[in-house]
Image: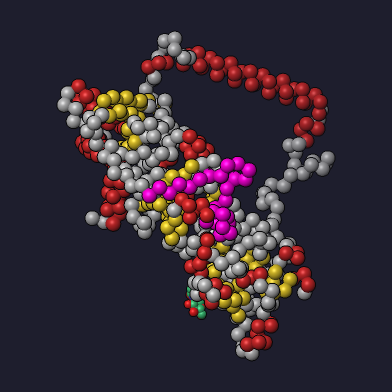
Amino acid sequence: MTARGVFVVNLLFLIGGCNAVYKRWIPNTDFNNPSNWDLGRVPCKNNRIVFPESAPLVYMQSNTTLMNIVLPSNGEIVLGDYVTLGFSDKIDTSATCRGGDANFNRTSAVQWVDTNNWCVTAHPDDPCPSTPAPPMLDTEKVPCKYDDVTFPKGSAFYVNLASKLLLNMKSLTLNGQGFSTNTFSAYLTSNMGKKQFVQNQGSSPTRININGDSCYDVTGCACGNDQGNVLAAVCAVQSSRCTSPMCRSALTPTGHCCPICGAVIELDYGAGFRLERIKNMISEDIASKKDFNSSSVQMMLSKLSSGKIQVVLLDDHDGMMAVDVGRTVTRKIESDIKGSRIYAVTTVKMQVSESMNTPSPQTGGNDVGLSSGTLAGIIIAITVCILLIAVVGFILMRRKLGDDFYKFRRFGSKKGFTMEMGATSGFENPIYGTTGPITDMYGPKEIKLNLNITKEQNGNESSLRGFDNPMYESKGAKDFFSDPTKTDPSVRFNPIYSTEGIEDDSKM
Ligand SMILES: *[C@@H]1O[C@H](CO)[C@@H](O)[C@H](O)[C@H]1NC(C)=O
Ligand SMILES: *[C@@H]1O[C@H](CO)[C@@H](O)[C@H](O)[C@H]1NC(C)=O
Ligand SMILES: *[C@@H]1O[C@H](CO)[C@@H](O)[C@H](O)[C@H]1NC(C)=O
């Protein structure tokens, strides 16, 4: 079996079983991450590096040579182990490297509750699946109560924790180090913690609860995000991404933000219930359907915070294939409740969406809702009204403006209103596209590193002189992310602010 096959099977097993997976944070504030730069690539030697005033903590993982750097007044660059930040005033002529400004554009913290920021894997070091994993409820795409949460080693982060949330998880690892509820809450108040995890000001802070609990319940374990503040926060971000459903009476399952086409089944259960049994039965049912392409029907099986079991069936079309599976499954469970009770389900309830094409039974000409005839009448009436208003407006405006009314439409009319076709580029930003000297837009804020001093001291030809990572010589960069209580507050993180070799441009 291929690695991906193993991964999918594992993930299916875990999701169907007890929701315990690894959730890895994706965005970082690393210097070497192309998506953190407006150029869409990591800056090279000929670029002037501009960190905006709101820049977060930036992590530099590899040896880098720069010419010019504009720093925020309150920012930090953290150098990794054995990393040197070098400065050179020689233009790299060989280079494929175009000049101009490189702006660091990861300027705001991104939301913990944003599903796009998490990668769900079965094992801690698995790569993020490029194809979408089996579908999950939106609230299960962010860390759940039984999940292991990882902020990968060798990166810095900028996470918005919002406020008033209670975020539960089994474990949290940051830069290779595990935390408990107490050590993490201490970390959040440390210098490094405050820079990487921001909270909304002025309201009660978000709490991170690291419980260490594994799920051993054969009836499943609830993720816990399908209610209250966490649900609202996840959906506040996610709802804007919903696509309009290709069906009527679309359903929004508990714990999900977007309406789906298909079937939602809710089960109550008694003693002897096993989630795995229900899952296998539905999987077999999906596989046994011969009259449609069954590979496109998918299931999301969850225990809800209410204690009920929710089965969501959806397909990649209008939901009718999923509804078909849902009906079969419901019939099977209903007859099991009356008969052998092997599934130990006590009640079953199903809701289904409807096809766009078939007329809905409720609006088929009876007195419920508007008939299509009435609706068409109303639409025609509204259209006529709008047309009338437009015509009246046109006549009034024409009277008021007289002949000038038409002059707007003539290009180059004598009255001086000209419109040039084709010149649509708008404002030009002087920063972009220039390879020559750059207009100094930042004035005295710009810091240029003058390297002549170090050259003289060295007495060699090299115009390259780096700042060694002070941490490497003292305590090692590991300590940056180590237990905050042990972090030496006297350590200076940013070698840039050392005055040696630095001169302000404005004085030159
Ligand atoms: C930064 O710019 C790049 C390239 O234009 C873009 O792909 C990326 O999404 C931007 N990032 C942010 C946080 O705006
Ligand atoms: C950076 O350069 C130094 C000196 O050339 C070297 O010892 C070190 O291994 C380099 N670091 C990395 C991360 O490549
Ligand atoms: C069934 O669906 C899969 C994935 O959606 C697709 O690759 C395959 O071609 C489909 N088969 C048929 C017979 O439509």
Q: Residue furthest right?
A: 415
Determine if residue 319 is in view.
no
Percent x, y for residue 85? 57, 73
Q: Residue furthest left?
A: 340
Kindly identify the residue that appears in the image at 65 percent across and 83 percent down.
454
Q: Which quadrant holds residue 294?
A: top left
Kindly identify the residue that appears in the image at 55 percent across and 49 percent down.
160
Where is the N terminus found, in terms of image quarters?
bottom left
Front residue of 371 and 258 = 258
Kindly identify the residue that appears in the image at 35 percent across and 26 percent down.
352
Percent x, y for residue 144? 41, 44
Percent x, y for residue 493? 59, 67
Indicate the colouring scheme. Answer: secondary structure
Q: Quick check: 206 above or below 325?
A: below
Q: How many marks?
A: 0
Q: Quick check: 165 above or below 308?
A: below
Where is the C terminus found, in terms of image quarters?
bottom right
Determine if residue 112 is in view.
yes
Front residue of 317 and 22 = 22
Q: Residue furthest top?
A: 367
Percent x, y for residue 506? 77, 69
Front residue of 255 and 368 = 255
Left or right for 398, reference 3: right
Kindly identify the residue that appears in the image at 63 percent across and 73 percent down.
67
Q: Quick check: 153 above or below 293?
A: below
In the image, is residue 201 part of the stretch drawn in magenta? yes
In the image, is residue 238 part of the stretch drawn in magenta? no
Range shown magenta: 187-212
Left or right for 405, reference 28: right
